[in-house]
Image (cartoon, helix red, strand yellow):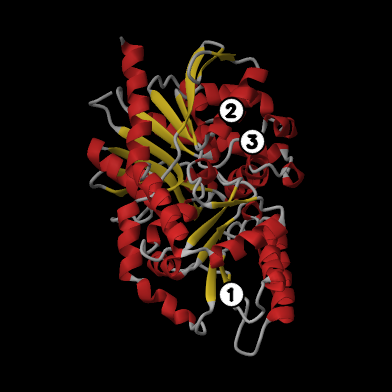
Amino acid sequence: MADGRLIVVSNRIPTEEAPSGGLVVALHDALKERGGVWIGNSGKRVASEEAQKGLTRIAETPYARYSFDLTEEEHAGFYLGYANSTLWPLFHHRTDLLAVDPDQARIYREVNDRVAGLIAEVVQPGDAIWVHDYHFLPLAEALRKRGVANRIGFFLHIPFPNPSDMPALSERKLMPGWLSAFDLIGLQTRRDVSNALDFLRDNGAELLLRGKMKYGDRSFEIASYPIGIDVDAFVRAAEEHADSGEHLRLSPGERLVLGVDRLDYSKGLPQRFAAFGEYLSNRPDPKIRATLLQIAPPSREDVEAYKEIRQELETITGRVNGEMAELDWTPIRYIRRNIQRDILAGLYRRADACLVTPLADGMNLVAKEFVAAQDGSDPGVLILSHFAGAAEQMEAALMVNPYDPGETARAIEQALSMPLHERQARHLSLMQTIRATDIGWWTRTYLSALLQREEKASH
């Protein structure tokens, strides 16, 4: 394995020469170091004949990058359909939003089978394959059926579903075969590992020692690898763009509470807006002004549930602002588009508090980015949902139940009135955590476990 390449498979693939973003940069560095191939969806929709042409090489150095195309039917069935209207709500504990469509399930498996065929054409003996996320759950099984015996690892970036939710999935009996075809399954949290072990054990898998499992003739391993960020890069970006907050034009003494999330029902945004409205109603001094700046770029707007969340947020924003606003003060500023990453780093640094209050989340790197961006001599306060994966690591944050608007409102008040020495102590603890488990640590730890597993198997 030491001499083999790394083959990364993800739904999307960076096309620029110097990728940006923590995960992308980490995978870029791992591929550059080992040599290898990155395979992903180009994002283009093409005619069926063109989609069947196979992989397109989009970069030569420092490693090969190949893309594949989807047809309109595949995009609708594989991506918008089964991946994001069936698996996404199931894995985020929203079975009430789950779509059951046999055609979408069929297309999902067909796309995975086609991608497996493309990978089989480029894989070499000794290569390790690292598959990312819920789009490709059946991929290892499809590769095994093609005779690919290489080490195949999988990392799930979102939560693993509760075993009690799994009966809502029509294809649940296929899931043990999908998962056991991988050699190492990486999950974000210990809670996710527990859910996965319980589900597999309830469906015929045998639990061995230290997260190892056996299903049929396959042995595999499940473990927690909490993903991190490039801390130093984010510290630099925040320092270099510290003036981003000046563009907000806040009045003297006005406090800034920040939220940064994709527009998604798993992020708890309606509950967050309602909690902020409750904080404003109950704040001890009505003359105190605090503004919630919520940045929520859209995602998957073709899915009906996302249209509904957008309408709900706009309704709550209008109500809170209508009741609370002054001529020179708007309590909720809601931006529904992307903001450049460097500008975001400066906004993090300016914020007095950051609300990271998802109802379900794999990790939530916004929590870690906010901490990295702070000025340690006068840091802001992180308010974190118990249901974010980051809560297992970031215990020095103010923890809240996002379903309880009163509790979140009280946490906002606590954050904005917290004395400097307590803010500094909490920030120092959080900073030590995110440095110890940064994105480089995550990549090295996961790949080391995958490689060691093969070495043990070969002896």
Task: Point out the tag, 1 or 3, that comes first from the N-terminus.
Answer: 3
455 is higher (above) or lower (below) than 117: above
Which quarter of the rendering shows the N terminus?
A: top left
Q: CA distance from mark 1 to mark 3?
A: 37 Å
Secondary element type, mark 2: helix
Q: Amino acid at mark 2?
A: Ser
Q: Position of residue 121 (x, y in %)?
A: 37, 31
Q: Amino acid at mark 3?
A: Pro
Residue topped by disc 3? 161
The quadrant where residue 26 appears: top left
Q: Residue at x 37, y 76 (%)?
A: 243
Closer to the camera in the image, 357 or 285:
285
Count of all numbered marks drawn on residues in the image: 3
Whether residue 106 is visible to the viewer of this picture, yes or no, is yes
Which quarter of the rendering shows the C terminus?
A: top left
Circle number at residue 290: 1
Residue 174 falls left or right of residue 230? right
186 is higher (above) or lower (below) than 435: above
Q: CA distance from mark 2 to mark 3?
A: 10 Å
Residue topped by disc 2? 194
Residue 106 falls left or right of residue 157? right
